[in-house]
C-alpha cells in the first residue's frame, strides 16, 4: 500500500527556511518575530473559538428558560410575567457561566435584564409605538433605558384591556428574542466552522498525534482488541492441540454472529454497560459517530460487548422494539468487524464505510440483513413455542377491587424553574423536595423503553399490559416498581397486584 505524503504539504514550520530578511534587521530577530507572529495568531484564533463556543453554551441555557416564561405568559397572562420578575429580584439564583471572570453576571441577572427590556418594549408597542426590523421606535427614536416607560405601565392596577394587550405583546416580543437567539446561534456555528477550517489548513505540533499508539494505552486496561486468542508456538502446538483452533475462514464475521444469534442461552450474556448502551443508541449508518465513539472509548470493542449487544437485540425484538433491535445488531457487527481486523485495520475499515465504498457497504448490509433476519425469525419461533406450551410467565397490572380502574399519572416534562405550590397542605411542603421528586419522576419516565413510553401515553391499561407481557418477569417487576416510585400509577388504597399468569 503506497504511503500518502500529501498530508505534510500543510505543515507549518516556524524556522528560518522561509524568512525574508530586512537589510536593517538581523536574521535571528526576524526569525523570532516570525515565530511570535505565528503563535500569536494561533492563540488569537483559539481564544475566538473558545468565545464562540462559550456563547453557544450560554444560549443553550437561556433559550429554554425564556421559552418557559413565554409559555407561562401565554397560559397565565401578565401576572405570571410579573411574578417571574419578582422572583428574580427577591430570590435570585447564583448560577452563572463558568468563565472565571469576577464580574460574570448570573443567568438570572441576564434574564431579568431581558424581561425589563421586553416589558418596556411591549408597553410602548401597546401605546402605539412603531416596530422596524424588530426594534421599537417612538417618535422616530429607538427606545432604550433612557426612554423609560409609558406612565400607565408603572401603575399597580393596569386596566384589563391594557393587561390583555400587554400580555399578548409580551409573548410576541419574547418569541422574537428567541428567534434572534436562534439566528445568532446559526451565525456562530458558521463562524466556528470557518475558524476551525482555517486552523486545520496548517498542521502544527499540537495537532499531530498517532492513533492507536501503544504509548497512549493504559497498561492496567489493555485494548479489547488484544483479548483475541493468539496462535500457539510450534513447541506447544502438539501438547494443546485440542485447545488451539486457528480460524482462517474469511466469512468468520457471519459465522460468529450466526452462532451467537442462534443460541438459546440468553441469560449467559451480561447487561449492557452504560458505555455500550450509548454506543447502541447511535443511529444505523452513523459510521462517523461510531468511529468517533470508538476513538474516545475503545472498551466497546470487547467480546462481552458484542455478545451483550446481540442479547439486547433479542430482548428488544421480544418487546416489539424493532428499531433498538436493529441498532444493536448494527453496532454488534461493527464491533465484530473491528475485532476481526485488529487495531491496524479499524481506521481503514471505517474510512471505507464513511466514504461509502460500494463493495464494503454491500457486504456490511448483507451481513446486517442476515443477522437481524435470524434474530427476528428465532424470536418469533421462541414466542410461539412459549405460548403453545403455556410456560410463558408475564406480569400484568390488575386492580384488587374490580370496581376500581387503574390510571396513569405521567409527567409532562421536568419541573419548571418557577415552580409554585398552591392549594391546601402545600405551605408545609419543601419546594426543593418537590422539585427533586418531579425531576426523578421525569428521569424515570425518560429511561423507559420507547414502546413502554408510547403505551403509557395512551393511558390505556390494556396497551401497557401488552408491553409488560412481552417483558421478562424480573424486568416487568422492576418497571412497575419504578412506576410506583415515580407516582405514575393511580389506584385505590388497596393497591395494585402484580399477577403472574400462565399464557
Image: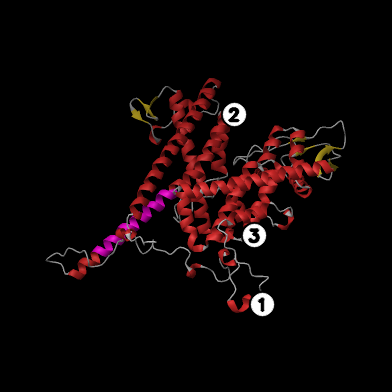
Is residue 38 within the magenta segment?
Answer: yes
Residue 219 placement (x, y as % from top left): 55, 71
Is residue 352 within the magenta segment?
Answer: no
Which of the two discs, 1 and 2, labels the residue nearer the N terminus?
2
Residue at position x 58%, y 76% in the image: 233
Q: Which residue is mark 1?
A: 239
Assign the magenta stretch its main secondary structure. Answer: helix
Q: Secondary structure at mark 3?
A: helix
Which of the two discs, 3 and 2, labels the residue nearer the N terminus?
2
Of residues 450 and 329, the one nearer the viewer is: 329
For the record, the magenta segment spans 34-54
Please give left or right for residue 168 compared with residue 204 in the image.
right
Residue extending furthest left? 23
Image quadrant assignment for residue 455: top right
Residue 36 placement (x, y as % from top left): 27, 63
Q: Nearer the viewer, mark 3 or mark 2?
A: 3
Image quadrant assignment for residue 138: top left
Q: Which mark is residue 201?
A: none
Number of marks present in the image shown: 3
Residue extending furthest bottom? 235
Q: Secondary structure at mark 1?
A: loop
How much space separates mark 3 and mark 2, taking CA atoms? 51 Å
Q: Which residue is mark 2?
A: 75
Q: Which residue is mark 3?
A: 304
Quadrant where the N terminus is found in the figure: bottom left
Q: Is residue 340 visible?
A: yes
Amino acid at each position: 500500500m503506497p504511503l500518502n505524503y500529501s498530508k505534510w504539504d500543510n505543515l507549518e514550520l516556524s524556522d528560518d527556511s522561509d524568512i525574508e530578511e530586512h537589510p536593517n534587521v538581523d536574521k535571528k530577530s526576524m526569525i523570532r518575530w516570525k515565530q511570535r507572529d505565528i503563535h500569536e495568531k494561533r492563540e488569537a484564533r483559539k481564544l475566538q473559538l473558545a468565545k464562540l463556543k462559550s456563547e453557544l453554551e450560554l444560549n443553550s441555557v437561556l433559550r429554554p428558560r425564556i421559552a418557559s416564561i413565554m409559555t407561562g405568559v401565554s397560559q397565565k397572562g401578565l401576572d405570571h410575567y410579573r411574578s417571574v420578575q419578582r422572583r428574580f429580584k427577591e430570590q435570585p439564583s447564583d448560577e452563572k457561566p463558568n468563565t472565571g471572570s469576577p464580574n460574570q453576571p448570573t443567568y438570572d441577572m441576564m434574564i431579568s435584564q431581558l424581561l425589563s427590556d421586553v416589558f418596556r418594549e411591549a408597553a410602548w408597542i401597546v401605546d402605539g409605538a412603531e416596530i422596524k426590523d424588530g426594534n421599537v421606535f417612538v417618535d422616530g427614536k429607538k427606545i432604550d433605558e433612557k426612554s423609560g416607560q409609558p406612565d400607565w405601565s408603572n401603575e399597580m392596577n393596569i386596566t384589563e384591556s391594557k393587561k390583555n394587550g400587554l400580555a399578548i405583546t409580551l409573548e410576541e416580543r419574547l418569541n422574537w428574542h428567541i428567534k434572534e437567539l436562534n439566528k445568532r446561534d446559526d451565525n456562530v456555528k458558521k463562524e466556528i466552522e470557518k475558524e476551525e477550517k482555517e486552523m486545520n489548513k496548517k498542521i502544527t505540533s499540537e495537532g499531530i498525534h498517532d492513533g492507536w499508539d501503544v504509548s497512549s494505552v493504559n497498561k492496567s486496561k489493555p485494548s479489547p482488541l488484544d483479548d483475541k486468542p493468539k496462535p500457539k508456538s510450534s513447541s506447544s502446538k502438539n501438547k494443546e492441540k485440542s485447545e488451539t483452533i486457528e480460524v482462517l475462514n474469511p466469512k468468520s464475521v457471519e459465522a460468529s454472529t450466526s452462532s451467537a444469534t442462534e443460541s438459546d442461552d440468553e441469560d449467559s450474556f451480561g447487561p449492557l454497560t452504560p458505555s455500550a448502551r450509548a454506543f447502541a443508541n447511535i443511529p444505523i449508518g452513523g459510521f462517523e459517530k461510531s468511529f468517533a465513539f470508538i476513538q474516545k472509548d475503545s472498551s466497546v470493542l470487547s467480546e462481552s460487548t458484542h455478545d451483550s449487544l446481540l442479547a439486547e437485540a433479542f430482548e428488544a425484538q421480544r418487546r416489539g422494539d424493532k428499531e433498538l433491535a436493529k441498532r444493536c445488531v448494527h453496532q454488534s457487527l461493527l464491533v465484530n468487524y473491528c475485532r476481526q481486523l485488529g487495531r491496524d485495520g479499524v481506521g481503514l475499515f471505517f474510512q471505507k464505510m464513511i466514504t461509502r465504498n460500494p463493495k464494503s457497504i454491500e457486504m456490511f448490509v448483507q451481513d446486517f440483513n442476515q443477522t437481524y433476519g435470524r434474530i427476528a425469525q428465532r424470536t418469533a419461533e421462541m414466542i410461539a413455542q412459549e405460548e403453545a406450551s403455556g410456560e410463558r410467565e408475564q406480569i400484568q397490572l390488575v386492580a384488587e377491587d374490580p370496581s376500581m380502574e387503574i390510571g396513569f399519572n405521567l409527567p409532562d416534562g421536568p419541573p419548571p424553574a418557577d415552580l409554585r405550590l398552591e392549594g391546601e397542605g402545600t405551605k408545609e411542603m419543601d419546594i426543593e423536595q418537590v422539585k427533586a421528586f418531579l425531576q426523578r419522576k421525569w428521569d424515570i419516565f425518560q429511561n423507559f423503553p420507547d414502546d413502554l413510553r408510547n403505551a403509557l401515553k395512551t393511558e390505556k391499561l390494556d396497551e401497557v399490559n401488552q408491553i409488560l407481557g412481552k417483558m421478562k418477569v424480573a424486568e416487568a417487576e422492576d418497571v412497575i416498581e419504578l412506576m410506583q416510585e415515580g407516582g405514575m400509577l393511580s389506584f385505590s388504597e388497596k393497591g395494585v397486584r402484580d399477577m403472574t399468569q400462565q399464557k
